[in-house]
Amino acid sequence: MAILNVTPDSFSDGGLLFKSSKIDEALVSRRVEELVADGAEIIDIGGESTRPGAASVSVQEELDRVIPVVECIANNCDVAISVDTSSPQVMTAAAASGAHLINDVRALTRGGALSAAAQTGLPVCLMHMQGTPETMQDSPGYSNVVTDVSDFLQQRVVSCLDAGISSSKIWLDPGFGFGKTLEHNLALLRHLPELVSLGFPVLVGFSRKSMIGKLLGRELPERLPGSLALALMALERGAKILRVHDISETRDVIDTFMAVKIASNQQ
Ligand code: YH5
């Protein structure tokens, strides 16, 4: 899963996609085709910055950022489209514009989100977060991070099933960096098989995140090797989807992993 930020303040490529508040369709299509050629299978479009300390955006602003990009990709590119949103209005509009997956860092807890997501009939990715993006890194605490995250996600699964979302359309994500210390993140990765054993596809996102900065003392541009190491460890522990910035490098990790796995199945 390739990250495509459409926040104007984005540190990666967001601002580039906007030309005087209208999206540049040719530029978006070209960028997405490049991601697909590099090995992306899903494009994750996010219009709300959920980085630690980030301010919230209005629903209208999120709609204005996300929907034209979803429409553009749906009309011009042959790739699965995911929307990184917690807002029911954005879920509904994105589905109508051709999105294929709802990726919600708040696990459909916002008022109206559960029924809006169910109405779309799309698969959903439920992520764990402690607190809110404004304050989540202030003093994260758990009695047991692995069971707390797993229990929360299992409760959200029950809510989804009650709302009419089929179990075949549910993905889970422990939410690396969302209200977690480095130690919490490492414990979640070490114990990822426990989340995988719940029987849903598990998505992980740690690409370039500050857990790598803390672990290695690296700034953003120097976090690729750490990101790839974590990606491989997540694959080994059963993760099925990697949400990343660096597509071709991560594709090589996946292909290498799969080649060894297939070879070992044939012995
Ligand atoms: C995720 O893990 N993350 S947005 C800070 C960074 C780098 C990247 C300081 N949406 C996830 O990508 N959706 C985000 O460096 C997500 N899982 C799912 N499912 C934060 C982000 C980032 C933050």
Image: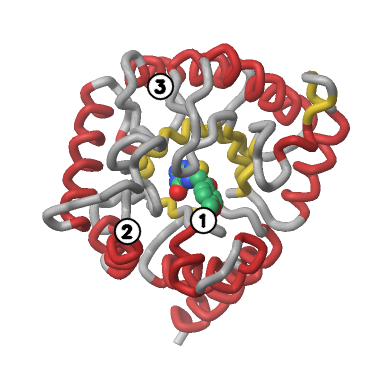
Is residue 13 shown left or right of residue 254?
Answer: right
The residue shown at (71%, 20%) is 68
Q: Are marks 2 and 1 in contact (CB under 8 Å)?
A: no
- Where does label 3 land, which residue? 117
Q: Outermost residue toward the front?
A: 138
Which residue occupies the extreme left position in the image?
A: 143
Chosen colour scheme: secondary structure
Please give the residue where the numbered disc 1 appears in the rendered image.
Answer: 242
Neighbor class of circle 3 (other Cα within 10 Å; few <14, some 14-19, many 20+) is many
Tell me the residue that label 2 is attached to.
181
How far apart marks 1 and 3 lie (CA) works out to 22 Å
Alpha carbon separation for disc pair 2 and 3: 30 Å
Asked whether, in this view, residue 101 is left or right of residue 131, the answer is right
State the residue in front, 221 or 22: 221
User: Which element carries disc 3, helix, strand or loop?
Assistant: helix
Identify the element where label 1 is drawn: strand
SS at badge 2: loop
Measured along the vertical axis of the image, is residue 8 above or below residue 41? above
Residue occupying the point 64% across, 38% down: 5
Percent coordinates x, y for residue 174 in the rendering: 33, 51
